[in-house]
Image (cartoon, grey):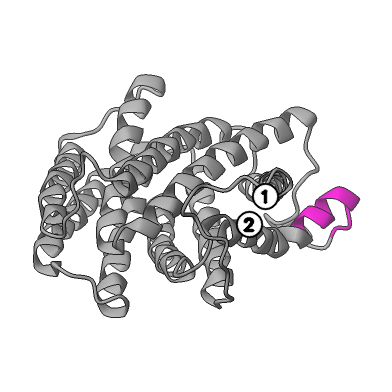
Amino acid sequence: MWILLAFISASLLGLYDVAKKQSLKGNAVLKVLLLNTIFSTILFSPVIINSIFDLGWFGDSSFNIPLGTLHDHYTVFIKAVLVLLSWIFGYFGLKELPLTIAAPIHATRPVMTLVGAMIIFGERLNLTQWAGVLLAIASLFLLSHSGKKEGIDFRHNRGVLLVVLAAITGACCGLYDRHIMHSLEPMFVQSWYVLYQAVLMSVTIAILTIFKVKKQGSSDAFHWSWAIPLISLFLSAADVAYLFALSDPDAMISVVSMIRRSSVLVSFTCGAILFHERNLKAKAFDLAMIFIGAILLYIGSR
């Protein structure tokens, strides 16, 4: 079941990337990110309110969560900080790069997660799973050559650096998730961490506004797009599926992370159709390797 949930999460993440790219067109990154955290909090506000006042709205379902201890909330707050850092890097990077470049770069995250899982949790992959991981790694090296045809030098491009930093912090969050999901319920983590993210983003925006902090050349422009609430909807659903997958005692974070990165197939397809991005044939070959790698991981985990 955890494998199926991982693939559902991957599909939703692909749609999330598309909504995010559309939302950032001509918009200030931090404002879009703030709205994302607010809409996510609104989606889970009934769960939070029910938890605080013990209203019993959801009966015996997974949405009826306990209020939790101070230590539980501290644990979730740390997750909120890690995810928010990854988002900030990722949003700024995506604004500067084509979606068909940024999404595959972010697919390096499972490789980093794999190394961490082997070191921290003692996870071991079988031969089929290793074949899937190696195919995914090889595809990323090929992608760097595809990027050069669009004038993107992976070694000196700021957008590439930001997306790589997003992948690193995302990998750290994945490992942290695997650790905390042994003791916390998925809906407790999901509902409270989005609230803490909204608080953190509100404080950040307030500080920047009060002290009038603005980078040279940055823009505060904003226009409404219906893609903005879709960011929250797709991401929240993807995260719920992901956390329920990790709550399975048999789940392997290295495998779940790699499967979730197959979301790049959805991102790539929409990037080609909706954003008319270039050099698709070379990128399509690279993505096919990622897809085959995800299939091998699925077969090796059955």
Q: Which residues are magenta?
A: 47-56
Left or right placement of residue 255 versus residue 54 in this view: left
Q: Position of residue 239 (x, y in %)?
A: 52, 54
Q: Which residue is found at the position 66% from the left and 64% from the top?
A: 39
Crowd rating for badge 2 (residues with CA inside 10 Å; few <14, some 14–19, many 20+): some
Q: Residue 278: which quarter of the image?
A: bottom left
- Label of residue 288 in the image: none
Q: Position of residue 92 (x, y in %)?
A: 44, 52
Sequence order check, earlier mark of 2 and 1: 2
Residue 212 seen in render: yes
Q: Kindly indicate whether the residue at mark 1 contacts the one at mark 2 (C-beta within 8 angstroms).
A: yes
For the stretch drawn in magenta, the main secondary structure is: helix
Specify the amino acid type for callout 1: Ile
Name the residue carrying label 1.
205
Q: Which residue is found at the position 32% from the left and 33% from the top?
A: 112
Crowd rating for badge 1 (residues with CA inside 10 Å; few <14, some 14–19, many 20+): some
Q: Nearer the viewer, residue 252 or 280?
A: 280
Residue 1 seen in render: no
Task: Judge whether residue 53 is colored magenta.
Answer: yes
Left or right placement of residue 187 versus residue 144 in this view: right
Task: Judge whether residue 282 is colored magenta.
Answer: no
